[in-house]
């Protein structure tokens, strides 16, 4: 058994698609549009086969709390400490908010955390 995909609602569908395809080498499918429901989506597929579904629909509101249960971050393994450092520096230089790192965590991960254009936390690991 494996996780097939994770889905995120957004109010910036094209911007989020560009972020995950540009920085994490995801490959998008053709946009799905359901005009009756005011719904649009992309599936972004990554090298490992994992997929991220990005969805936009009329009437969806933003989550405005910093403390909640549920999805906390997405983690991408980039293969080496040097690649963690390189991508982290690039994202920060290009204006994405750094949350932490790069650093070695107490549980043995070398990681950094940044925010995507919607404020979702993205963890970059070895």
Image: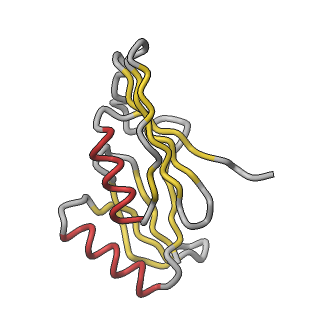
Between 80 and 51, the one nearer to me in the picture: 51
**7 left or right of 56 in image:** right
Q: Is residue 31 above or below residue 15?
A: above
In the displayed orientation, state which residue is furthest to the front.
Answer: 30
Q: Position of residue 39 (x, y in %)?
A: 41, 23
Residue at 56% across, 74% down: 109
Residue at 46% across, 72% down: 111
Residue at 67% across, 48% down: 4
In the displayed orientation, state which residue is furthest to the right.
Answer: 1
Residue at 26% across, 74% down: 90
Between 15 and 30, the one nearer to me in the picture: 30
Q: Is residue 39 above or below residue 36?
A: below
Between 62 and 54, the one nearer to me in the picture: 54
Q: Position of residue 48 (x, y in %)?
A: 61, 65
**122 left or right of 52 in image:** left
Q: Position of residue 42 (x, y in %)?
A: 45, 41
In the displayed orientation, state which residue is furthest to the top.
Answer: 36
Q: Position of residue 116 (x, y in %)?
A: 33, 52
Total labels drawn: 0
In the displayed orientation, state which residue is furthest to the bottom.
Answer: 82
Q: How is the image coloured?
A: secondary structure
Between 37 and 106, the one nearer to me in the picture: 37
């Amino acid at each position: 058994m494996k996780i097939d995909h994770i889905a995120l609602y957004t109010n910036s569908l094209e911007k989020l698609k560009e972020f995950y395809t540009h920085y994490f080498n995801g490959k998008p499918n053709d946009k799905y549009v359901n005009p009756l429901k005011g719904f649009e989506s992309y599936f972004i597929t990554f090298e490992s086969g994992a997929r991220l579904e990005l969805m936009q629909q009329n009437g969806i509101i933003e989550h405005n709390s910093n403390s909640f249960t549920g999805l906390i971050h997405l983690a991408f393994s980039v293969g080496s400490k040097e690649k963690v450092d390189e991508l982290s520096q690039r994202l920060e230089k290009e204006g994405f908010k750094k949350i932490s790192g790069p650093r070695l965590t107490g549980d043995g991960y070398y990681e950094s955390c940044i925010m995507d254009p919607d404020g979702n936390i993205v963890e970059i690991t070895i």
